[in-house]
Image (tube, grey):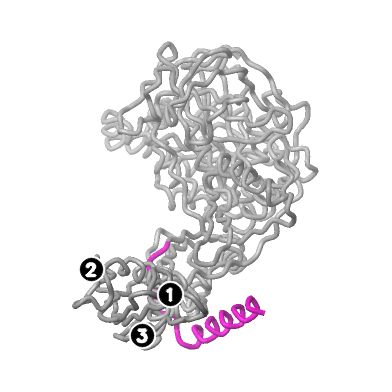
């Protein structure tokens, strides 16, 4: 595996779900000798989809990295490549794999063409400063496959500098267009577009193209090679993965024109460039963490600079703790191969780190921190509950294992509803996470649709009074409080105002009244939800020289608040979420028409070719199952992001149901 850094090629395979990423991965693995037979997703023999979850669902869930040598023109190259999910529920795996790669292959099915996932893959690469992007056409042997139409769709979507380098001459032959002085008749129209793209790579070729109207084959080859290496031209390759046709052409072209490590910039958290130097100080980033049955936690490290070896001491610069590299491995499915050294561009699995998790930087100098991977926010929430006491005892450990491995999973103890929430990027993502809790920690949980974290407030002024008087022999309890409440204005920081004059309530009891008000704010006055944006004035009261106490005034303050709020036109508030929905134009009407049924509204629309972006807002109460509903409405062609926008008043018909349900629950608890 010892290869000079200049001959290392690190790339990620991306694309829409079902576009042939994993089949291409298996074909490359077979060609490179990583597998003694062609792996297939359909029969569970894929080198990439090896977990039970992946096999049972028939989709890629986890990013998988492979490494092998390839000989081309007498030179030895090392190919490091990563297969990724296409399902948007596992976007975290996709973006992590992109962070660990220098270049990208985006698969496009020749019958489906450019899809939402194709555009998403392109955007991820651009956002992460990967300029070396190539397209790989798959499914060319399917009925209705159309090479020229698919190439045209790619050029329409991503620019005319996307040019075919290899093309199918038949179902069992792929030709390299750059090596052909004369093209077959069915590909003759491609020559002009190749010449145009080549001409744009240099002023000399541009002048010659304008003067002559075309370029010689050798000039086209040189211009395209230079453009692809610079990231200005994006090659399109054709392959038949199941038969292996076109795979050699693809690998040879990758070795010739895809840049070595150092071309794609890595920066530290202050924006400074991290130099790729094989002989420099080691810097690496952990982009994936898994739990192995036998080895425990495994951290996958992308080497950015320097060399990593077993026995080395490095610093986790995110935590400041020192770590020792006990061993390093290359993974092919579940097979582990120990290695002695890793350099720039390599990805290795390291076991037994103590404080390391995804997104952490390991550095020999103890200072460098690689700019962190930016993960999307969750869009699907479920409430979870341990099935048994034994599960309850282990649940915290199980959840933290999930969080360490998957930054797109979030965990929250909901104050308003007293529920434990698990948040992810979709219902399948949540299902897989729950299954992992069982596999990794033997913890079983049940999932439920969460309760909505409503809030309460008032829309007018109101007054309340309560006298707490209790006499049961001996010293009694006495405290009387008069409150006035009003909506808290924007920018007003004072939510509790003491306006007592003349000693109606002694100063030492005022904090007790405020504490009672604070507790009343948490308990609510309408349906038992926390109160917000309410200003409270304490303006009168009375006390007893002997019987008054802090407890009495705390109770009086809480009860007076409840009465004051009930006289101030109280309302329920619900969280409103902002949605950004990306869909093909075909589904615009269905998505826009569905939004009113969710008590939502469309705020705006934007287009990017045939892809539309709808901005909308809707109550969280209507969105707990939106990921599954959106997938159903669009056949998996859509994706969306969701973020909290504000709290807004619940419509009266909905509020009545919530209040009635809260009253019923209180009654059940009292019984």
Q: Earlier in the sequence, mark 3 or mark 2?
A: 3
Numbered disc in front, either 1 or 2: 1
Q: Earlier in the sequence, mark 1 or mark 2?
A: 2
Residue 36 at x, y percent in the picture = 78, 26
477, above or below 181, in the image: below
Q: Residues within 10 Å of mark 1 (few under 14, many from 20)?
A: many
Residue 407 at x, y percent in the picture = 52, 44
In this orientation, which residue lies closer to the viewer: 191 or 671?
A: 671
Picture residue at 29% right of the left edge, 74% below the top: 535
Q: Secondary structure at mark 1?
A: helix
In the picture as drawn, the residue positioned furthest to the right comes out as 43
Instruction: Inspect this view and state whether residue 332 appears.
Output: yes
Q: Any mark on residue 465, and which? A: 3
Magenta residue span = 644-671
Q: Residue 661: within the magenta?
A: yes
In this orientation, which residue lies closer to the viewer: 620 or 146?
A: 620
Q: Secondary structure at mark 3?
A: strand
Q: Secondary structure at mark 2?
A: loop
Residue at mark 2: 492
Where residue 300 sits, quadrant-wise, is: top right
Residue at mark 1: 555
Where residue 625 sits, quadrant-wise, is: bottom right
Question: Disc 3 to disc 1, how far (Cα)?
Answer: 12 Å
Numbered disc in front, either 3 or 2: 3
Q: Residues within 10 Å of mark 3 (few under 14, many from 20)?
A: many
Question: Disc 3 to disc 2, how far (Cα)?
Answer: 24 Å
Tell me whether the residue at label 3 lies in contact with that at label 1, contact meaning CB atoms closer than 8 angstroms. Answer: no
Secondary structure, magenta segment, majority class: helix
The quadrant of the picture occupied by the C terminus is: bottom right
564, above or below 261, in the image: below
Picture residue at 44% right of the left edge, 34% below the top: 132
């Amino acid at each position: 595996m010892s290869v000079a850094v200049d001959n290392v090629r690190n790339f990620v395979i991306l694309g829409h779900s079902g576009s042939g990423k994993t089949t291409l991965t298996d074909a490359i693995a077979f060609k490179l000798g990583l597998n003694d037979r062609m792996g297939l997703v359909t029969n569970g023999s894929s080198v990439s989809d090896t977990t039970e979850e992946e096999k049972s669902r028939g989709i890629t869930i986890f990013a998988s990295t492979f490494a092998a040598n390839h000989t081309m023109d007498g030179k030895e190259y090392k190919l490091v490549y990563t297969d990724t999910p296409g399902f948007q529920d596992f976007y975290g795996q996709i973006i992590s794999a992109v962070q660990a790669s220098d270049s990208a292959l985006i698969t496009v099915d020749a019958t489906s063409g450019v899809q939402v996932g194709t555009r998403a893959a392109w955007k991820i690469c651009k956002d992460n400063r990967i300029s070396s992007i190539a397209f790989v056409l798959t499914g060319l042997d399917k009925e209705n496959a159309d090479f020229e139409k698919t190439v045209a769709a790619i050029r329409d979507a991503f620019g005319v500098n996307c040019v075919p380098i290899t093309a199918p001459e038949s179902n069992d032959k792929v030709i390299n267009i750059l090596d052909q002085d004369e093209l077959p008749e069915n590909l003759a129209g491609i020559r002009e577009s190749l010449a145009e793209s080549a001409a744009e790579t240099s002023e000399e070729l541009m002048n010659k193209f304008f003067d002559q109207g075309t370029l010689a084959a050798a000039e086209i080859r040189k211009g395209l090679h230079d453009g692809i290496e610079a990231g200005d031209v994006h090659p399109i390759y054709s392959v038949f993965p199941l038969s292996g046709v076109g795979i050699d052409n693809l690998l040879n072209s990758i070795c010739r024109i895809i840049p070595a490590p150092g071309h794609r910039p890595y920066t530290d958290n202050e924006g400074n460039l991290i130099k790729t130097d094989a002989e420099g100080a080691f810097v690496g980033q952990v982009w994936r963490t898994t739990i192995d049955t036998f080895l425990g936690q495994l951290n996958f490290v992308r080497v950015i600079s320097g060399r990593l070896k077993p026995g080395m001491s490095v610093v986790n610069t995110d935590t400041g703790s020192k770590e020792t590299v006990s061993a390093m491995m290359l993974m092919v499915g579940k097979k582990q191969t120990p290695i002695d050294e890793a350099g720039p561009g390599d990805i290795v699995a390291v076991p037994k780190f103590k404080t390391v998790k995804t997104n952490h930087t390991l550095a020999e100098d103890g200072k460098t921190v690689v700019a962190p991977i930016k993960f999307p926010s969750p869009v699907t929430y479920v409430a979870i509950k341990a099935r048994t006491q034994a599960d309850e005892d282990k649940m915290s450990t199980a959840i933290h294992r999930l969080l360490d491995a998957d930054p797109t999973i979030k965990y929250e103890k909901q104050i308003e509803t007293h529920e434990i929430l698990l948040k992810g990027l979709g219902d399948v993502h949540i299902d897989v996470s729950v299954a992992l809790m069982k596999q990794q920690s033997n913890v079983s949980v049940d999932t439920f649709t969460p309760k909505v974290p409503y809030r309460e407030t008032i829309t007018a002024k109101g007054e309340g009074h309560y006298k707490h008087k209790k006499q049961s022999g001996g010293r009694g309890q006495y405290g009387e409080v008069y409150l006035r409440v009003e909506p808290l204005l924007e920018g007003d920081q004072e939510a509790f105002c003491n306006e007592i004059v003349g000693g109606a309530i002694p100063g030492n009891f005022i904090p007790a009244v405020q504490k009672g008000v604070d507790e009343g704010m948490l308990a609510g006055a309408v349906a038992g939800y926390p109160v917000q944006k309410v200003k409270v004035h304490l303006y009168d009261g009375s006390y007893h020289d002997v019987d008054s106490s802090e407890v009495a005034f705390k109770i009086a303050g809480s009860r007076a608040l409840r009465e004051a709020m009930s006289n101030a036109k109280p309302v329920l508030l619900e969280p409103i979420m902002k949605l950004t929905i990306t869909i093909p134009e075909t589904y615009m009407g269905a998505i826009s028409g569905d939004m009113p049924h969710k008590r939502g509204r469309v705020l705006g629309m934007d287009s990017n070719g045939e892809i539309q972006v709808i901005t909308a807002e809707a109550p969280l109460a209507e969105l707990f199952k939106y990921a599954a509903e959106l997938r159903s409405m669009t056949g998996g062609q859509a994706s969306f992001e969701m973020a909290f926008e504000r709290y807004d008043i619940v419509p009266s018909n909905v509020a009545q149901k919530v209040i009635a349900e809260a009253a019923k629950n209180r009654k059940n608890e009292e019984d």
